[in-house]
Amino acid sequence: MRTEESAARGTATSTATTHQGLDQLTRREREVLLLLADGLGNRQLARELGIAERTVRAHLANITRKLGVQSALQAALVGDRCRAVVRSGIAADEGTADGQ
Protein backbone atom coordinates (compact mmCIF):
# COMPACT_ATOMS: atom_id res chain seq x y z
CA MET A 1 0.00 0.00 0.00
CA ARG A 2 2.73 2.46 0.91
CA THR A 3 4.60 1.71 -2.31
CA GLU A 4 1.49 2.45 -4.36
CA GLU A 5 0.89 5.71 -2.51
CA SER A 6 4.48 6.90 -2.93
CA ALA A 7 4.43 5.90 -6.61
CA ALA A 8 1.20 7.87 -7.09
CA ARG A 9 2.73 10.88 -5.34
CA GLY A 10 5.86 10.58 -7.50
CA THR A 11 3.77 10.46 -10.67
CA ALA A 12 1.70 13.46 -9.59
CA THR A 13 4.86 15.40 -8.73
CA SER A 14 6.58 14.57 -12.02
CA THR A 15 3.42 15.48 -13.97
CA ALA A 16 3.18 18.82 -12.19
CA THR A 17 6.88 19.46 -12.83
CA THR A 18 6.44 18.58 -16.49
CA HIS A 19 3.53 20.99 -16.86
CA GLN A 20 5.62 23.73 -15.23
CA GLY A 21 8.37 22.93 -17.72
CA LEU A 22 5.91 23.18 -20.60
CA ASP A 23 4.90 26.63 -19.37
CA GLN A 24 8.55 27.70 -19.62
CA LEU A 25 8.92 26.72 -23.28
CA THR A 26 9.03 29.42 -25.91
CA ARG A 27 6.65 29.24 -28.85
CA ARG A 28 9.44 27.91 -31.11
CA GLU A 29 10.44 25.29 -28.54
CA ARG A 30 6.80 24.15 -28.42
CA GLU A 31 6.77 23.86 -32.21
CA VAL A 32 9.98 21.81 -32.11
CA LEU A 33 8.54 19.62 -29.35
CA LEU A 34 5.38 18.84 -31.33
CA LEU A 35 7.34 17.94 -34.45
CA LEU A 36 9.71 15.85 -32.35
CA ALA A 37 6.68 14.05 -30.89
CA ASP A 38 5.58 13.35 -34.48
CA GLY A 39 8.85 11.46 -34.97
CA LEU A 40 10.92 13.95 -36.97
CA GLY A 41 14.69 13.81 -36.62
CA ASN A 42 16.99 16.80 -36.33
CA ARG A 43 17.54 17.18 -40.07
CA GLN A 44 13.82 16.91 -40.79
CA LEU A 45 13.03 19.39 -38.02
CA ALA A 46 15.53 21.84 -39.48
CA ARG A 47 14.00 21.55 -42.96
CA GLU A 48 10.43 21.82 -41.69
CA LEU A 49 11.19 24.93 -39.61
CA GLY A 50 13.65 26.53 -42.03
CA ILE A 51 16.46 26.65 -39.47
CA ALA A 52 19.93 25.12 -39.11
CA GLU A 53 20.42 21.73 -37.47
CA ARG A 54 22.62 23.44 -34.92
CA THR A 55 19.66 25.63 -33.96
CA VAL A 56 17.49 22.52 -33.65
CA ARG A 57 20.04 21.00 -31.29
CA ALA A 58 20.03 24.21 -29.23
CA HIS A 59 16.23 24.11 -29.02
CA LEU A 60 16.33 20.44 -28.00
CA ALA A 61 18.89 21.18 -25.28
CA ASN A 62 16.64 23.94 -23.91
CA ILE A 63 13.56 21.72 -24.10
CA THR A 64 15.17 18.80 -22.26
CA ARG A 65 16.52 21.14 -19.59
CA LYS A 66 13.20 22.92 -19.04
CA LEU A 67 11.23 19.67 -18.97
CA GLY A 68 13.75 18.03 -16.64
CA VAL A 69 14.26 15.02 -18.91
CA GLN A 70 17.46 13.31 -19.98
CA SER A 71 16.98 12.88 -23.73
CA ALA A 72 15.14 14.02 -26.83
CA LEU A 73 13.26 10.72 -26.77
CA GLN A 74 11.90 11.47 -23.31
CA ALA A 75 11.01 14.98 -24.44
CA ALA A 76 9.18 13.51 -27.45
CA LEU A 77 7.17 11.27 -25.13
CA VAL A 78 6.23 14.27 -22.97
CA GLY A 79 5.27 16.18 -26.09
CA ASP A 80 3.10 13.34 -27.29
CA ARG A 81 1.38 12.85 -23.92
CA CYS A 82 0.85 16.57 -23.38
CA ARG A 83 0.11 17.49 -27.01
CA ALA A 84 -3.06 19.43 -26.15
CA VAL A 85 -1.24 21.52 -23.52
CA VAL A 86 1.62 22.26 -25.91
CA ARG A 87 -0.78 23.25 -28.71
CA SER A 88 -2.79 25.47 -26.38
CA GLY A 89 0.42 27.29 -25.46
CA ILE A 90 1.13 27.96 -29.13
CA ALA A 91 -2.43 29.20 -29.65
CA ALA A 92 -2.11 31.47 -26.62
CA ASP A 93 1.14 32.87 -28.00
CA GLU A 94 -0.58 33.55 -31.33
CA GLY A 95 -3.37 35.41 -29.52
CA THR A 96 -0.92 37.68 -27.71
CA ALA A 97 1.09 38.23 -30.89
CA ASP A 98 -2.08 39.44 -32.62
CA GLY A 99 -2.64 41.93 -29.80
CA GLN A 100 -5.62 40.11 -28.30
Image (cartoon, helix red, strand yellow):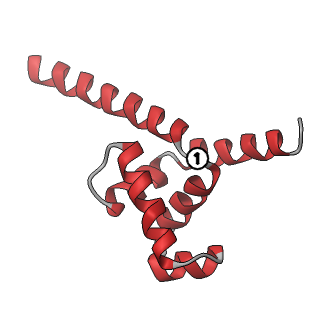
Which quadrant holds the C terminus?
top right
Which residue is painted at 60% across and 75% down in the image? 51
Q: Relative to 14, say whether 29 is above or below.
A: below
Front residue of 7/53: it is 53
Front residue of 71/62: it is 62
Q: Relative to 13, say whether 27 is above or below.
A: below
Q: Could you tell me if residue 1 is visible in this image?
A: no
Which residue is painted at 32% across and 33% down in the image? 14
Residue tagged 1? 86
> In the image, residue 18 lies at what x, y percent?
41, 37
Front residue of 79/62: it is 62
> The residue under label 1 is which amino acid type?
Val
Which residue extends farthest right? 99
Q: On the rendered structure, is 80 left or right of 87?
A: left
- Say how many tags the image has: 1
> In the image, residue 7 lies at what x, y percent?
19, 28
> In the image, residue 45 lies at what x, y percent?
54, 75
